[in-house]
């Protein structure tokens, strides 16, 4: 009761100022809530209460909560917002201008659901019960009942606060390849800053001695954000992001690890124990399996924040990857990671969703428009797709072995594969810093040892029949293949995979818009061109194809899915496209060839020769 009075008092004080606030931008479901217009309408006999008050008592970082509520003036568009931290009246924004007062509430909920969801009689009875899933996000939680719909929220009642047993616990490990083949990096999130505890990883072989490796700690502040909503209602403290470098790994060996924080009183707070398999030595012959997709996003298993089909798409893809984890060695999520779009709480929820995958195999990411783009901040595109994050969240939450994580291009080796990952949100054209990197990366593959050379990027720099590209007449991101095809051809790139377009498409081996082979399923000998694949159906709303049938497009699928590459040895590669709905293969091809087939000269790919002997 005292808590409720406190909230009312602070709200009344704030209400004396007028609330003028720019509508948050971005297409996140949370942006549908006009939280900046929230007003107070506390009702004497309305209540909302949540149980249990302590979550994660068995050490788990995800738990279910029952929320019970009653409102005599119930309406069909009443909704429940989950707030964290619980004290929402403390979420005060500073005015951006001395003449404009800040809004009443300056924090978007971390999720929401309508009060009549699973309670069809709510409007008549005013009573409802919701089951919601929460994850450990460092702070406590409260639940607020609003009337007035999402457009004109009126706060009717606020619940008791609930919390995880240890809100600061180390959570959601993300493995990534280091800068050398024998190094694995572990990145995780916690509530422990370096003035409170020392972060480290305890790790070692399945059987044998364990060792400790220290971790570095990063975070970012509201001032690191470039605009709204990331700087305003979408801001939420990201906690501390730790990265440890596990070095001198034995090729293909299995390791166990757990995350630790040594408090200054000597106590150690541990995570659960996880395991991974070290990368093979570059060029080493072994069974190697790679999963690639883009644009997965996150979704809520409890049905909240329903939006554009992310629920079936994103959750199905995640589940299929988990089901096949025993047959997967490395994952590439090539941009448009979680579509937080400036609502920072969503990064925790995404890293929680992928934890079973990212804690077990390297989870390598690329940068997309929804991570990076913001006007006037150096992104190649001047749109607002990052919701003001301007790359900071992605570059901090995930490690990639780039020289500079703000320029998100890098190379990585996995046995017989050599990957060159481009950053389409920065200039790639000839003469640019990135173009030099791409050429150097492609030239670095010793094809006798690493025959499978793969180019990855978020936007489609090669070929796509997406209607929005076709209507521009480009069938690609403008200036894509015009800039890069001579490099792909010169260095015999086998496969280029993109996201951004939310569907699946595969081309013939192609150079300068023409197929270099008529084969469709089993390529033997030289490819003479590059096979381009769109694998952007990870989970975000699907993208239409044009009805025009080009010569280079071999297979199109308007559905959610992902790509899997299996290298059996230096001469045999299997490509598969699987649907996220059932995990079955719907398109595939094989490449069978020898080293001399890669060396074979075709148009524009061999150095000049001499008659001298
Ligand atoms: Fe995108």
Image (cartoon, rainbow, N blue to C red):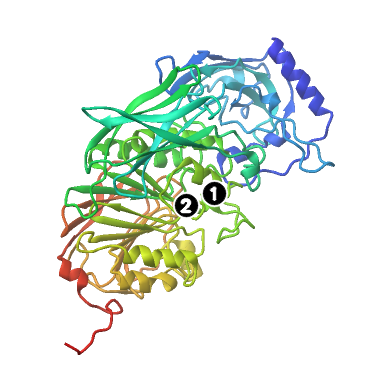
Mark 1 residue's CB less than 8 Å from ligand 1 = no
Of label 2 and label 1, which has the lower sequence position?
2
Residue 183: where, in percent of width, then height? 32, 44
Decide: few, some or many residues near mark 1? Use Cα within 10 Å; few <14, some 14-19, many ≥20. many
Disc 2, ligand 1: is the CB inside 8 Å? no
**Snapshot quadrant of residue 521:** bottom left
- Residue labelled with disc 1: 391
Classify 10 Å Cα crowding around label 2: few (below 14), some (14-19), many (20 and above).
many
Q: Which corner quadrant holds the N terminus?
A: top right
Residue at screen point 22% across, 77% down: 601
Question: For this view, does 293 lie left or right of residue 92?
Answer: left
Residue 205 in the figure: left or right of residue 425:
left
Residue at left offset 17%, top offset 70%: 597
Q: How many marks?
A: 2
Residue 423 at x, y percent in the picture: 46, 58
Where residue 224 appears, as percent x and y from the top left, is 62, 44
Label 1 residue SS? loop
Q: Quadrant of residue 58?
A: top left
Badge 2 vs badge 1, beta-carbon distance below 8 Å: yes
Helix, strand or loop at label 2? It is loop
Q: Disc 2 to disc 1, how far (Cα)?
A: 8 Å
Q: Is residue 269 above or below residue 387?
A: above
Q: Position of residue 38 (x, y in %)?
A: 71, 31
Q: Image height check: is 207 above or below 414?
A: above
* Disc 2: which residue: 367
Q: Is residue 33 visible?
A: yes
Between 191 and 548, the residue placed more toward the observer is: 191
Residue name at image x 48 percent, y 40 percent: 397
Q: Is residue 526 left or right of residue 605?
A: left
Quadrant of the drawing holding the C terminus: bottom left
């Amino acid at each position: 009761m005292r808590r409720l009075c406190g909230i009312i008092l602070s709200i009344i004080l704030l209400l004396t100022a007028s609330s003028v606030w720019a509508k948050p931008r971005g297409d996140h479901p949370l942006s549908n809530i006009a939280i900046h217009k929230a007003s107070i309408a506390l009702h004497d006999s309305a209540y909302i209460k949540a149980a249990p008050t302590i979550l994660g008592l068995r050490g788990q970082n995800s738990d279910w909560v029952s929320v019970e509520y009653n409102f005599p003036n119930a309406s069909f568009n009443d909704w429940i917002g989950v707030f964290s931290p619980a004290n929402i009246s403390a979420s005060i924004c500073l005015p951006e201008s001395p003449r404009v007062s800040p809004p009443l509430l300056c924090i978007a909920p971390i999720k929401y659901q309508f009060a009549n969801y699973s309670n069809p009689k709510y409007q008549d009875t005013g009573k409802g019960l919701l089951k919601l899933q929460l994850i450990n996000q460092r702070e406590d939680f409260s639940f607020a009942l609003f009337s007035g719909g999402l457009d004109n929220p009126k706060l009717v009642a606020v619940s008791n606060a609930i919390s995880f047993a240890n809100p600061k616990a180390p959570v959601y490990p993300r493995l990534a390849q280091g800068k050398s083949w024998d190094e694995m990096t572990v990145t995780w999130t916690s509530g422990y800053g370096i003035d409170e505890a020392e972060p480290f990883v305890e790790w070692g072989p399945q059987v044998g001695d364990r060792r400790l490796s220290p971790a570095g700690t990063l975070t970012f502040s509201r001032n690191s954000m470039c605009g709204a909503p990331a700087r305003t209602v979408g801001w939420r403290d990201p906690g501390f992001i730790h990265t440890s470098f596990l070095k001198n790994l034995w090729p293909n060996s299995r390791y166990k690890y757990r995350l630790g924080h040594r408090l200054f009183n000597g106590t150690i707070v541990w995570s659960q124990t996880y395991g991974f398999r070290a990368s093979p030595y570059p060029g080493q012959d072994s069974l190697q399996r790679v999963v690639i997709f883009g644009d997965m996003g996150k979704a809520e298993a409890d049905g909240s924040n329903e939006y554009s089909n992310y629920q079936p798409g994103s959750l199905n893809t995640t589940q299929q990857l988990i089901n096949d984890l025993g047959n997967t060695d490395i994952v590439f999520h090539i941009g448009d990671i979680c579509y937080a779009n400036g609502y920072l709480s969503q990064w925790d929820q995404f890293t929680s969703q992928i934890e079973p995958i990212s804690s077990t195999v390297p989870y390598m990411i690329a940068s997309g428009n929804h991570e990076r783009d913001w006007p006037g901040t150096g992104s190649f595109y001047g749109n607002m797709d990052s919701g003001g994050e301007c790359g900071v969240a992605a570059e901090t939450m995930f490690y990639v072995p780039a020289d500079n994580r703000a320029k998100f291009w890098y190379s990585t080796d996995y046995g017989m594969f050599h990957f060159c990952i481009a950053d389409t949100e920065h200039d790639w054209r000839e003469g640019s810093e990135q173009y030099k990197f791409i050429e150097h990366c492609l030239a670095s593959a010793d094809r006798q040892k690493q025959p499978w050379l793969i180019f990855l990027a978020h936007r489609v720099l090669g070929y796509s029949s997406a209607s929005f590209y076709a209507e521009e007449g480009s069938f690609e991101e403008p200036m894509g293949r015009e800039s890069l095809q001579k490099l792909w051809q010169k260095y015999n790139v086998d496969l280029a995979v993109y996201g951004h377009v939310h569907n699946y498409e595969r081309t013939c081996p192609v150079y300068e818009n023409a197929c270099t082979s008529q084969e469709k399923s089993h390529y033997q000998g030289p490819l003479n061109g590059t096979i381009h694949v769109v694998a952007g159906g990870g989970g975000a709303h699907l993208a239409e194809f044009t009805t025009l049938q080009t010569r280079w497009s071999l297979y199109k699928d308007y559905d959610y899915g992902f790509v899997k590459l299996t290298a059996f040895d230096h001469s045999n590669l299997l490509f598969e496209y699987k649907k996220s709905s059932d995990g079955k293969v719907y398109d595939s091809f094989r490449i069978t060839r020898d080293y001399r087939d890669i060396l074979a000269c075709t148009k524009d790919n061999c150095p000049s020769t001499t008659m001298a002997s």
